[in-house]
Image (tube, rainbow, N blue to C red):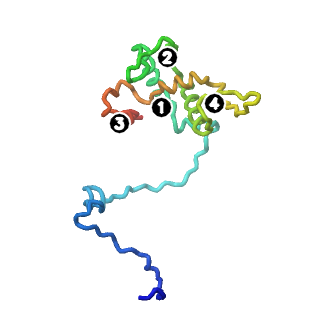
Amino acid sequence: MSSQEIHIIDNHSFDSPPFTAAANDPTGAPDIPPEEGRGDDFQPFNLEYRDFQINPLPQQPLELFQLFVPISLVQSWVGYTDNWAFFCADNGVKDSWNTPLSDHSRLHAWEGISTATAYVWLGILIYLGIHREISLEDHWKAPSLGDQRPLHPFTKFMPLQKFELITRYFRTFDHTNLDVSDERDLPKTFQAAEE
């Protein structure tokens, strides 16, 4: 065939033949049969017909948020958080690795948190994820002459030190059901929140 000859191009010109690996090729895709109850044994979930319905939204944004994060759930988190913080303070440690608690630790002044405080903390956490600053402390800094920065409105609800303290000790699970002394148990941390 000469270099002047051009082949006709059709819809199948760029199709490649199916990949076939050599018998001793370790890089080929393994031919594993499907597991029992999976693969070609698919049983569809039967949904009953329901009429289309539009529910009115709550009047207040907090009420809408509480549909997704109900008060009962936050109350359990508050209980877990208080139990963990008081446990650490009573045992003179500041974390689950038994790091000793200093005499000047803010944990000594822990009085517990309320459900309302937990909602404020959660709201600030969401706000921080949306409105980024260079550092966490920058959200609480006020603008000054020559240093123009946004004034974040949530700072009047919670000071930085309280936010950091709650963030450090906030628990969404019961710490008594978890043993993190063995690193192999660490995946259980992520399974501990059962609600």
Q: Residue furthest right?
A: 145
> Where 35 falls versus 187 (above or below)?
below
Q: Residue placed farthest to the left in the image?
A: 23
Q: Position of residue 90 (x, y in %)?
A: 41, 13
CA gap, disc 4 and disc 3: 34 Å
Q: How many marks?
A: 4
Residue 76 at what x, y percent from top left?
45, 27
Measured as percent of width and height from the top left, residue 63 is found at 59, 35
Mark 3 neighbour density, 10 Å: few (under 14) some (14–19) many (20 or more)? few
Tell me, for residue 187, which label it has, or none: 3
Precedes in sequence: disc 2 or disc 4: 2
**Is residue 99 among what the camera can see?**
yes
Camera-side mark, 2 or 4: 4
Amino acid on which disc 3 is placed? Pro
Q: Which residue is mark 1?
A: 73
Q: Which residue is mark 4?
A: 138
Q: Earlier in the sequence, mark 1 or mark 4?
A: 1
Residue 135 sits in quarter: top right
Between residue 35 and residue 50, name the one nearer to us. Answer: 35
Q: Residues within 10 Å of mark 1 (few under 14, many from 20)?
A: some
| Residue name at image x 39 percent, y 23 percent | 96
Using the numbered discs, state the Cα–Cα distance from disc 2 to disc 4 in whole angstroms.
Answer: 23 Å
Q: Nearer the viewer, mark 4 or mark 3?
A: 4
Kindly indicate the quadrant of the structure image that contains residue 145. top right
Q: Secondary structure at mark 2?
A: helix
The residue identified by callout 2 is 107
Foreground pick, 29 / 77: 29
Report if the CB atoms under discs 1 and 3 are less than 8 Å apart.
Answer: no
Q: In the rendered view, would you say 15 is above or below 89?
A: below
- Whether pointer 4 and pointer 3 mark residues with C-beta atoms closer than 8 Å, the reply is no
Label 4 crowd (10 A; few <14 / some 14-19 / many >=20): some
